[in-house]
Amino acid sequence: MTTAAAYRSDHGPDTALFEESAGTITGFAYAGTLATEIADGGITGVEALELFDDMLAIRELEEMIVRLRSGGYDPLPSYEYRGPTHVSIGQEASPVGACSLLRIDDNITSSHRGHGDAVAKGFAAIRRMSDEALRARVPFSAGGTHEELLEAALEEHVYHVIAELFGKETGYSAGRGGGMHIGDFSTGNLGANAIVGGSVPIATGAAMAHRYDRSDRVVCCFAGDGAYANGVVLESLNWAAQAQWTNHLAGDHAYGLPVIYFIQNNHYGMTHHTDEEVMGVRHLARRAAGFSEDNMHAETIDGMDVLAVRDAVRRAAALCRAGQGPVLIEASTYRYYGHSLSDPRNEYRTREEEAAWRAVDAIERLKLQIVDAGVADEAGVAAVEAKVRERNARAAVRASQAADPDPAEALKYLYTDTASDVVPAGRGDVVPFVAVPPAKRDADGAITYRDAIRDALAEEMIRDGRVLFYGEDVADYGGAFKLTKGLLEAFGRDRVFNTPISEACICGTAVGAAIVGLRPVVELMYMDFALMASDQIANQAAKWHYMSGGQVEVPLVIRASVGAGKGYGGQHSQSLESLFTHLPGIYVIYPSNPADAKGLLKSAIRTNNPVLFVESQGLYPTKGIVPEDEVLVPIGVARVAREGNDLTIVSWGPAVPDALAAADRLQAEDGVGAEVIDLRSLVPLDMETVLTSVRKTGRCVVASQAILVGSYVNEIVARIQLEAFDFLDAPVARIGAQAGISPQAESLERAFLPNAGDIYDAAKGLL
Ligand SMILES: Cc1ncc(C[n+]2csc(CCOP(=O)(O)OP(=O)(O)O)c2C)c(N)n1
């Protein structure tokens, strides 16, 4: 374990002249053939036939999609295929060559054009499985020999892939993901991603987890050339190359991230040319030079030669397993079809160009070499072709007949009801290097909201070694608000570390680490910066449990603090919780007091759902009694903060103290008993507690600090009016910030934000 060695620089200015070259990146260096590979022991004839089989299986599957669209797929002449048609025909050598050198427990991530990656990783993993593991995948198979079981398992894999493409319950993701999000976690496929580049930080986070676990697992991240212009991808390269993984402060775990960035460079984005149009470099492998002193061991290879792919991935995986990752491989390849089948592709490329690439077709090239090297004769090769065709056809027919998901289950897998109730053996009861400084307690036992959060983190990090904590400046400095001071010293830099200013990567790596078994807690310095990470929060963290059909859980916590009320202006003051309530799949919690902050954060760390945990900087110094014993506050249970019979005030976060102040004034000045409900968690929402109160009081004000346009306040108001209309004696009133931008000037910000007086006035208006 690395302890808290300090990063304290004592370098003065150094302006000595230097010249630096970006080093050499090679391209197309591989010169082997199947015959030389066999002679050198790099491959066996059987393995060569397996590569052939695997590439054919991908092509057959995707040609099925092409023919289904035109009604020309003989096994299913009238099946109506719906959904995306991003076929990768032409690119098969990349996934097949790469996956053939990965272990079962290695991972891949994939792109919107990921059918081939899914088939290849599954086939490669299945080919390595024991009879027992194979039998578990095909319990119904009558086959007795290894070959029979293997063949049945391969067919079953194709079946589950096609069933997913057809949107069937027996698809890998139970029809919830489809081809653009297909994942098979049982064979190490962490999912395809329809957000171009979206999976790259996830792969990086999974590699970070493998490093943390001291395993020698590797992650191969497939993405297209277009993706390598995307911000989060470039952030990921920077993230993976950080010196802190390998320098002396990493102690006994100085080890580069075991990730292979495998660019499937088919030379087109959707229709644009990456090489000559939207990129300033000729070879994408050059990208690596900007991020790491050793160019990430980058190279360009012939992606139309499955043996060249194997050669590169063999070396890359070995480097990663030896702690010398990351590695970047640019495979030059081509897709014969357009972006999708609705793209005729004549606006942007010529038939001559297509013919030139088809002339170096990877499947044909391997077939010739198989015959030339004497691995099989023409008849043997034809037999493999027939076997693949028939296997795929049987799987497709079965998939077409499989049951559609039950419409009543459209929301199944949105959330999980599991939590980390038991910490696995060897992971629990961590002994800190030094004790976390105890929170300052008042005589009555009160501590601050800030310390309550820090204590929750510390307790959970002791309870469970899978909990990591990272974010910008959170380690030595203790975060911008000094909230996490002491955690680095207690848990070491392995578990508490500073990150680059890369909000998308902070959240995306957390998704990757979570789906392979860790429980990351990350900090966004200001909630406004969540917008920088919005794809990773909204499309990745929130969606993977559902899109995987429940195959995977995403236990992570994103802590984000709201800066409102400090005069920090429009980009550091936003209460954005409502935005995230609009994104099903992620819990949204906003505590109003120290006890809830602590108890809810502990629960958030333990639930297997992703959680956006919103904090108020204005509340950080406020105090409240927090029991010294462990208390978990349940998520999704509102708190009646003050009882009353005349009127209900519903609120959350920093609006709760205002609501309580308004209630006190109503009592004192008007003799009105207001009941104050602190929602605590917005998602899941405890509407029952709200309705029970409103049914009793007949009047309600709903208040938060968010601006009212699009606020979650409106959701509560609407539900009250729908579900308790008959009990209302007045319309429900709403309170929020003005529909504008947080101003800096105190006079303006005071006017902009709602306060206790506004709540009081609204309540009076109802009486
Ligand atoms: C973030 C994002 N922007 C745009 C798109 C629309 N889109 C889908 S595929 C694609 C091109 C991707 O190019 P590349 O990464 O090279 O992969 P390829 O399609 O060539 O396999 C685009 C622009 C998207 N899905 N996601």
Image (tube, rainbow, N blue to C red):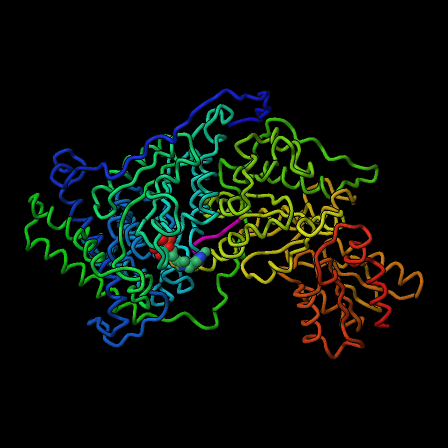
Residue most extreme to the right: 669
Coordinates of residue 539 in the picture (x, y in percent): 50, 57
Coordinates of residue 750 in the picture (x, y in percent): 81, 54
Rendered view: 147 above or below 30: below
Chief SS of the magenta region: loop
Q: Which residues are magenta?
A: 550-555
Residue 428 relative to residue 621: left or right:
left
| Identity of the residue drawn at 28% across and 66% down | 65
Coordinates of residue 14 in the picture (x, y in percent): 54, 21
> Which image quarter holds the C terminus?
bottom right
Coordinates of residue 606 in the picture (x, y in percent): 57, 47
- The picture quadrant for ligand 1 comes to bottom left
Rendered view: 33 above or below 52: above
- Can residue 730 be seen by looking at this rendering? yes
Residue 329 relative to residue 684: left or right:
left
- Can residue 132 be seen by looking at this rendering? no
> How many marks on residues?
0
Residue most extreme to the bottom: 726
Residue 69 relative to residue 734: left or right:
left
| Identity of the residue drawn at 34% across and 46% down | 263
Rendered view: 17 above or below 99: above
- The one nearer the camera, 489 or 93, is 93
Is 451 included in the stretch rendered in magenta?
Answer: no
Rendered image quadrant of residue 34: top left
| Identity of the residue drawn at 15% across and 49% down | 365
- The one nearer the camera, 626 or 277, is 277
